[in-house]
Image: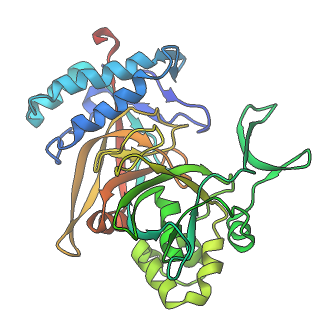
Amino acid sequence: MSCALLLSFSGCGKKVLLPLSTNQYPLFRDAHAYTGLDRAMEQSLIYLRKRPPSTSFTIGNHNYSINHLIRSIEFFRILIEKHPSPTLLNRQISTYFDIFQASGTEGYNPKHKMLVTGYYQPLFEGSPVRKVPFLHPLYGIPSDLVLRRNSKSGAKQIGRLEGSHFLQYWTRKEIETHQSASSNELVYLRDPIDAFLLHVQGSGLIRMTDGTIRGIHYAMKNGRPYKSIGKFMVETGRINLEEASIATIRKYLVAHPEEIKEILHHNESFIFFEWTATHGAIGNLGRELTAGRSIAVDQHCFPAGSLAFLRSRKPVQNGAIINWVPLERFVLVQDTGSAIRGPGRIDLFWGSGQKAGLAAGRMKEDGTLYFLLLKKQFL
């Protein structure tokens, strides 16, 4: 049955999910053998069930309740309990679900391709006090940061007050040069590149000098726009576009320490952190992320907590990247990020540690994304 509706969300500027007729459905198979999928679905369900029952999202001219998202995941969860074969799974999905494909990157894009990148939770050494070699702080939310709503648009604004004037909050350069967030230090790291990487990844693990490990997570940002230092380094001839990755960026910065401040300060965005009660990475839904299952997207475009199917490529490792193979798996929308904007971006969470970091750092692939929504007659 062809569905004549378009899923739309405010803030993306166009229809972002395209309805597919059943003969356009992709071949659904979970090459990850459903590992971690039930746990990821449970995290989304916990989040969705806590939202107000009046919460809705729009498909074309029709509003659907939050219960529709919940029932879609619950129903799918039952379908895969016994790990059905791809043949049976595709027959069931065709019977019970409407499928919507993400429109992908803007411009001429007939196959609706998206850019798929990866992120992970790093582990760094840290100290609760500033002492050599631990000199580079991660900050909690400073007392002078103000969050308010624009009186006309209702949009959230982050800034600071100077007398009765509401101003933009300090840039990365101002915070680090003038110590504008001093007295809010949570922990000190060895390396400014490590600290910057935590700002990009959004969460991490810190091994303290007494051997204990603590989780740290995004709490707030300074409201300044995110600017990619990788793109800046390519544009200024420091690295090649084809080689751009976390590893090559770090290698260049280590080899040119005199350029570190200039390059890092190009990104005005700055992240403030808080300690977490878990060692797991926490997404913006307030729920723990699942390696290989949680994705970060622009949640102005795609509904938070929803179920989707991702097709792309992934690296195969043996101490290093030795090959690339198809990536096909069901995923859940459980995070977002400063660099994840518009309907053409996906960031796949790879987990924690060095192996996850290697995979995440190399992901810069084409992909397609399909959302599963239970047909109304089966609610």
Q: Is residue 69 visible?
A: yes
Q: Quadrant of the N terminus?
A: top left
**Observer able to see residue 59:** no
Residue 103 locus on image (x, y percent): 46, 41
What number of labels is visible?
0
368 w.r.t. 247: above or below: above
Colouring method of the image? rainbow
* Residue 270, image quadrant: bottom right
Q: Quadrant of the C terminus?
A: top left
Q: Position of residue 254 (x, y in %)?
A: 48, 86
Give the x, y percent position of residue 338: 56, 53
Q: Residue furthest front?
A: 210
Is 106 positioned to the left or the right of 157 in the image? Answer: left
**Residue most toward the right?**
164
For the residue pair 173 and 231, the one nearer the viewer reads as 173
Residue at 27% across / 27% down in the picture? 22
Between 223 and 86, which is closer to the camera in this rendering? 223
Residue at image location 8% in from the left, 35% down from the top: 85
Residue nearest the viewer, comparing 202 with 314? 202
| Lateral position of residue 317 relative to residue 244, left or right | left
In which image quadrant can residue 286 be found? Answer: top left
